[in-house]
Amino acid sequence: MAKIIDGKEISANVKAQVKAEAEQLKAQGIEIGLAVVIVGNNPASRVYVNNKKKACEAVGFDSYEYALPEETTQAELLELVEKLNADDKVNGILVQLPLPKHIDENAIINAILPSKDVDAFHPENVGHIMIGDFSFLPCTPAGVMEMLKQTGIDVGGKNCVVIGRSNIVGKPMAMLLLHKNATVTICHSHTKNLAEVCSKADVLVAAVGKADFVTPDMIKEGAVVIDVGMNRRENGKLCGDVDYDACFEKAGYITPVPGGVGPMTIAMLMKNTLTAAKLKNNIK
Ligand code: BQF
């Protein structure tokens, strides 16, 4: 029977730490600000942006929301990013993805000042992550690593399998596991014998985007099963990529959805924003 890795509890620990450090900075007259940019009316994006604003309030950061209409042009959005790059009150810039189809996401990401890129999506920060000399880590993979750390799971020498190869989750996730000395396999839609590959994993990270994709035959007895998925069932209920009920008995550890990796993503965004403020003020 699996132990549940509680993302709510672990994220609360991270946020408490961030809040304590933010208070120390405030005592030195340093305010911390996060700009949150949302374009259009994607209801999921609205929820995520609200979560980020709420977290800012909880840790004592200022948040500045810029909600732009769906018709916003790429040039207009670039202009806003430039303005936020130059704004001293803004330590971190978060542009909520996905953007409307007529806007080139990479063009926007590339325009964000790397020192304010709290999502760590800018190529300069991606390069730092690859080398291992980073200041910001992408929030979701960093959240997974923090969950493993606080649960006392050392991935060194273990077989870790990541399903999914996105720039936001799969690729950086594999890199962070590699930095911690895991043997890492990245699987994707072209992978042959997926179930067999996954069933060899000591740690399985699912970032696929399909409900109930991971079934018990795909996991090793006692494996750590990390569910990064965020899907909605026909009945409107949130669920991950793992068939949680079916895998619960066989897994050693499992993360629920909701209440697993999701809250960690938000907590690590707060941590990155704190880091941005510390770097700007030459605080270690
Ligand atoms: C929870 C995200 C897919 C695509 C773009 C807490 C969040 C979600 C769930 C949240 C996500 C997912 C975010 C829970 C931010 C995580 O209690 O389980 C928080 O707000 N997330 C995002 O900004 O963009 C996404 C998933």
Image (cartoon, rainbow, N blue to C red):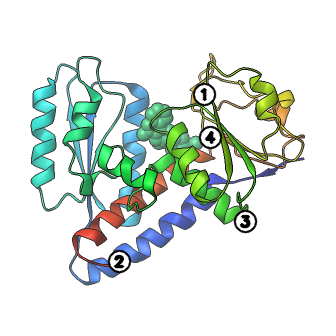
Label 2 SS: helix
Which x, y percent locates residue 44? 44, 29
Q: How crowded is mark 2: few (under 14 residues within 10 Å), some or many (20 or more)?
A: some
Q: Residue at x 72, y 32 (%)?
A: 242
Mark with earlier residue (2, 3): 2
* Numbered disc in front, either 4 or 1: 1
Residue type pointed to by label 2:
Glu
In this view, the residue in front, 163 or 71, is 163
Q: Name the residue under label 2.
A: 23
In this view, the residue in front, 184 or 13, is 184
Marks 4/1: CA–CA distance? 16 Å
Q: Mark 1 points at which residue?
A: 208
Marks 2/3: CA–CA distance? 28 Å
Mark with earlier residue (4, 2): 2
Residue type pointed to by label 4:
Pro
Mark with earlier residue (2, 1): 2
Marks 2/1: CA–CA distance? 38 Å
Q: Quadrant of the C terminus?
A: bottom left
The yes-or-no answer for disc 4 within 8 Å of ligand 1 is: yes
Q: Residues within 10 Å of mark 3 (few under 14, many from 20)?
A: few
* Numbered disc in front, either 2 or 3: 3
Mark with earlier residue (3, 1): 3
Q: Specify the quadrant of the image occupied by residue 194.
A: top right
Q: Is there CB contact under 8 Å for labels 4 and 2?
A: no
In this view, the residue in front, 169 or 160, is 160
Q: Mark 4 points at which residue?
A: 258
Q: How crowded is mark 4: few (under 14 residues within 10 Å), some or many (20 or more)?
A: some
Q: Is residue 63 visible?
A: no
Residue type pointed to by label 1:
Val
Q: Name the residue under label 3.
A: 152
Mark with earlier residue (4, 1): 1
